[in-house]
Amino acid sequence: MNRPPLDLSTARILISNDDSIHAAGIKALERIALALTDDVWVCAPETEQSGASHSLTIHRPLRARKYDERHYSVDGTPTDCVMLAMNSLLGDRRPDLVLSGINHGANMGDDVTYSGTVAAAMEATLLGVRAIALSQRFDEDTPLSFAVPERLAPDLIRRLATAPWAENVLLNVNFPAMPPDAVTREQVVRHGRRKLGDDLRERFDPRGRAYFWIGPQRNGETPAADTDIAVVEGGGISITPICLDLTHYQSMAGFADVLR
């Protein structure tokens, strides 16, 4: 079932991320949200939680820190933040839209299985609220800038809010690393393939004991034109719908047959 179009001018928006409440990206996203509505709330991790995926804190208590009426941090994961905000901190009115990000770095292809940014949007979707994860690609040798989403995201989000939107679907949006005027297009595409590679760095601590650091290298196929990776590398904005029903229906009959 698709939801009706959302009027953002009267909507309540919740913002979260995985880079922490102190990150530049979430401050940029709050400015974007305030261009859409006056009712904007922030609940994000106290410390960076990149790579936390859809993890939930269940073996210790969580503490929420209130900065003012609409700004909170939680000493947990992005999933914890969205769950606490929606079920407690926002009071008797849930958000109409959850925006997660803006992540410091793209979340494309297989990145989404690790991403805390995407996970915050997943949690909102599981709780019945429309959600968009937003990420900014950047080059290591240039300063990180959120000029592209700050210029282009408000109108993009407004248009996406009017589209048919299934209840178990979230949107994953990635912005290219270039000036806003150089952005080539917006395109709805599938995820490509690029996995964190086996770039393990072995080092030794002062006591001579080995430890390992997972490096940034990503290995993958040459991206097809209809993938998020190709669009963003070509200077465009990628939009990918993600469905939370993970069942592979085409395989069900085959597995059922061998169990008869």
Image (cartoon, rainbow, N blue to C red):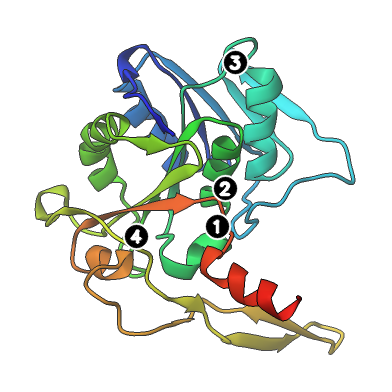
Q: How far apart are marks 4 and 3 (CA)?
A: 31 Å
Find disc 4 in the rendering and name its residue: 137
- In the rendered view, would you say 42 is above or below 198? above
Q: How crowded is mark 1: few (under 14 residues within 10 Å), some or many (20 or more)?
A: many
Give yes or no for contact between labels 2 and 4 (Cβ–Cβ under 8 Å).
no
Give yes or no for contact between labels 1 and 3 (Cβ–Cβ under 8 Å).
no
For residue 63, what is the image quadrant? top right
Find disc 3 in the rendering and name its residue: 68
For residue 256, what is the image quadrant? bottom right
Checking the image for residue 15, the label placed there is: none
Q: Which of marks 1 and 3 is in front?
A: 1
Checking the image for residue 18, the label placed there is: 2
Q: Position of residue 161 (x, y in %)?
A: 31, 30
Q: Earlier in the sequence, mark 2 or mark 4?
A: 2
Residue at the (54%, 27%) spot, across then down: 42
**Type of the residue with mark 1:** Ser
Find disc 1 in the rendering and name its residue: 115
Give yes or no for contact between labels 1 and 2 (Cβ–Cβ under 8 Å).
yes
Q: How far apart are marks 4 and 1 (CA)?
A: 14 Å
Residue 206 visible at all: yes
